[in-house]
Image (spheres, helix red, strand yellow):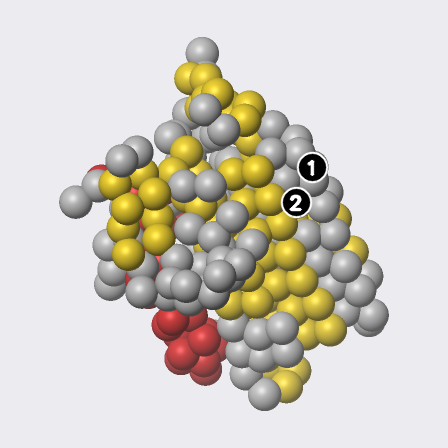
Amino acid sequence: MNTALTMKELFDYNQTLAAPLLEQYTYPWEVLPHIGAFIQELGAALPEEEYEKRGENIWIARSATVAPTASVNGPVIIGRNAEIRHCAYIRGNALIGEGAVVGNSTELKNVILFNKVQVPHYNYVGDSILGYKSHMGAGSITSNVKSDKTLVTVKAGDNKIETNLKKMGAILGDNVEVGCGSVLNPGTIVGKNTNIYPLSMVRGYIPAGSIYKKAGEIAEKR
């Protein structure tokens, strides 16, 4: 087992409603096929005084702000004090944490956003999990399908781990900062408290507490 890739090393489970789902698995990619069903089960149990059901499998916290121009499709849960801005596109299977920001023209699909996550400007996040207070700069995206359409592997050093998934975007640990215009390739996993330089092309596992400048040039934070 590569413990650096486990969810317990990447995330603070106290910062998401998805904790009961995450606790059932070891690695984050194992969770991705189960997000939609979990949202439906959890949504039905949410307190009505805090969450309003606004459509089929759509639960929105009464304290959340959703722009009238946003497109929201279920299954989805939008947490307390979250902000869904103008022309955001939520395609479904999205659990959006407390205080999270989903911005202008940002598209979400099959994702878990922990509390305080920010994807505020022209982002695509698909088949991915973003940890507490992680932030994706303007125009940065997760690429979730390989160009040859083969199954996604996670590369960690000399090891390759088969996910058995055709679609997997990126996993960002808590407090990860992704610079503007970056592309996170399928199977990317970024350890907590790591910074990705703008305009980066990222692939594989990036260790926690580091600064990713470019492929082959990763510095340890001091």
Q: Is residue 207 left or right of residue 85?
A: left
- Contact between marks 2 and 1 (CB within 8 A): the answer is yes
Pointer 2 residue? 140
Rendered-image quadrant of the N terminus: top left
Which residue occupies the foreground of this view, 62 or 16?
16
Q: Kindly tell me whether residue 189 is visible in this rendering.
A: yes
Q: CA distance from mark 2 to mark 1?
A: 5 Å
Does dot 2 land on a helix, a strand or a loop? loop
Which residue occupies the foreground of this view, 60 or 114?
114
Q: Kindly tell me whether residue 67 is visible in this rendering.
A: no
Pointer 1 residue? 180
Q: Is residue 17 left or right of residue 104?
A: left
Q: Residue 179: x, y in percent?
A: 64, 34
For the point 63% across and 40% down, the residue is 182
| Mark 1: amino acid | Cys
| Mark 2: amino acid | Ser
- The mark nearer the N terminus, 2 or 1, is 2
For the point 77% across and 59% down, the residue is 105
Q: Residue 29: x, y in percent?
A: 35, 58
For the point 66% across and 31% down, the residue is 198
Q: Is residue 213 left or right of residue 173?
A: right
Is 106 drawn above or below residue 14 in the view shown? below
Does dot 1 land on a helix, a strand or a loop? loop
